[in-house]
Structure formats: structure tokens, C-alpha cells
Image (spheres, rainbow, N blue to C red):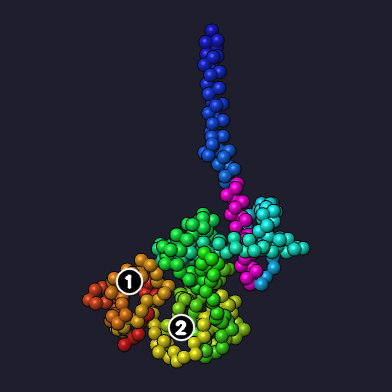
Amino acid sequence: MNELNYSPLTALLTFLGIVLLLFLLFRPGKGWFWLIQKNKESSRKVIIEDILKLLYHSENEEKSLNLVDITRTLKDPDDLIIDSINEMAEHELINLEGEHVKLTQAGSEYGLRIVRAHRLWEKFLAEKTGFAEADWHKIAEQKEHELSDADTDKLSARLGNPQFDPHGDPIPTNTGKMANVTGTLLSEMEVNSFGRIIHIKDKPDIVYRQILAENIHIGSHIRIVEKNANRVVFHSEGEAFVLAPIVAGNITVTELKKDVKVEENIARLSMLTEGETAEIIGISKEMRGESRRRLLDLGFVKGAKVSIELPNPLGEPKAFLIKGTSIALRNNQASKILILKD
């Protein structure tokens, strides 16, 4: 009797469960099926844009890529990359010339838009956030796919339509124009020549992180003191730097023909020792946004006198006396403040 009494209720609950399941699966705009399809389309868009950007950079360096090069470089499954390339060919974004993949005019323009979004994001991260410099590239690679052309224009306007990103790469305008970057690779500089660092490549990642670990900054003046097959040695801001040629090849400088002997006397605040006093010359361009404004507000302005008030037996942070106030800074902060020792 109980089974007969509850059978209609069970049937109703089963029916309602099926209806709910269908609703969750196929609800317009928010159903699981729709979300899965949306994720697939989003993934395909990201892969296509990654391929376009890869081809754009390679063609700018006068390198040709084939399908094997692309699948080896990107981390996506090979079948998705091949499907994306076929779709790109259908939409006339690329041409397949033998085994090589070439951008069409439309593909090149699309790739340039992704490059623009990426470099603007890196500029935003450098100027407006506290993210570590080593993380800018990775974050920008994710965010570059989320911006529409209108969003990219708004971001550029918010940043004051900058010409260069934090690494010294030119940022394209919305019409595709870019500032020229002309310089010499650090690895090709002659001994006793002078220069100013204008660009640091952020790829490959292992080389870029080594450069960051050395506290080498864009805008720094350098003098080459030694160069051979094994190393490049240069002086900058009171310090000696030793790099392997392959690492030095990721740094571009503009050669200085004028007398720069005065610049050689400049040091970093992190090098100040107990009992010494110095005059603030300026703040490195590597210190940006809120961090830069905070240092200026604390009194680290050009012409101010500074000394060490309290050394730290652990090394950092150190307490610096400036304008009668004790300010504690870590070495990575102090290394971006330039001084002239008394």
C-alpha cells in the first residue's frame, strides 16, 4: 500500500529532478552546457591571440615559424593549436606557405593590438599596483585577452598614453604607430665605452629573473670595464656587475658620447655605510607610482642630506636619517635611490 501511495510522488520528484537538471544544463547564458561552450570559445580565442602575438614578434625579428615551432613554444595541446591555426587560415589571419606560417595584413594588425594591450597592462602594473616586477609579464599575458579595443584605449588614456612599457618596449598607438628604439646590445659594447640602459628583455624568463636579481635598472649609466668570451663587466652607480654574454645580450643601451665622468660618482643609497653622509641625486625610474611618491613624501628629494642613523645587524632594513626623521628602508628600496657621497 505504501508503494502505491508514494509512487506518484516519486514520479513527480523524478520529473522535477529531470527538469531541474535540464534547466541547469541548458539555461540560456548561465547553464552548464553554455558555460562549457563559452570556456571552449574563450580558450580558442586565447590560443589564436597567443599564436598571432608569437608570429608578430617572430616576423619583427625576421624569423620564420612553422607548425612545429608553434606547438613547441605554446603550452596548449597540439590538437587545439592545429584547430586554431586552421580557423585562423579560414579567417585570413594567416597564410600557410609550405611549412611556414605567415601573418596576413589583418593578422599582423590583430597581433599588434594584443601586443599593445600587453604592454599597457605591464605599464599599469608597474605604475598603479604593488605587484613584483618579476610577475608583470605573466599577469599581463592573462589580462591582454580580456580587453576590448575600447577598453585598451581607456587604459592608455588613464596612463597618459605612454610611449614605452616598463622594460623599454615601445607601446603601439591605436593606429599602430610606435616609437623607434635604437641602441646597442650590452654584450656588443666596447671596453671603456659609456652608455645608458634603455631596454631589458623579459624573455626568456630565467635570464630576465637573473637581471632583476642583480638590481640592474633601466636608465642607469654604465661603463664597460672588461669584455671577453666568458663575461662582461661594467660599473654602474658605484657597483661592479659581472654578466655572462648571453645575459648581457638581453640588455640594450644607448651609447653616450658626452663626458659622463660625473655620473660615475653616483652610488646607490643601499651602499651607504655608517658614518658616511650623502646628498640625494634622484630616484631611479625603476621606482614607480605610489612607491615613488611615498619616497618623495618621506623626504628623499634631490638635494636632501642623508645618513645612516641605525645600522641593522641583520643587514636590513636600515634606518636612514633624512630631514631630522628616521626612515627604515629595505635594500631593494634603497638601491633605487641615487646619491652622491660627501
Q: CA distance from mark 1 to mark 2?
A: 22 Å
Q: Secondary structure at mark 2?
A: strand
- Give amino acid for label 2: His
Position of 200 with respect to 48 (left or right) is left
Q: Secondary structure at mark 1?
A: helix
In the rendered image, the residue lying farthest to the left is 324
Residue 26 placement (x, y as % from top left): 56, 34
Mark 2: few/some/many CA within 10 Å (<14, 14-19, 20+): many
Residue 170 placement (x, y as % from top left): 52, 71
Identify whether 236 is placed above or below 124. Answer: below
- Give amino acid for label 1: Leu
What segment is highlighted magenta in the picture?
40-61
In the rendered image, the residue lying farthest to the top is 1
Mark 1: few/some/many CA within 10 Å (<14, 14-19, 20+): some
In the rendered image, the residue lying farthest to the right is 98
- Residue bearing the label numbered 2: 221
In this view, the residue in front, 173 or 300, is: 173
Residue 295 tag number: 1
Q: Is label 1 in contact with label 2 (beta carbons under 8 Å)?
A: no
Q: Quadrant of the N terminus?
A: top right
Residue 308 tag number: none
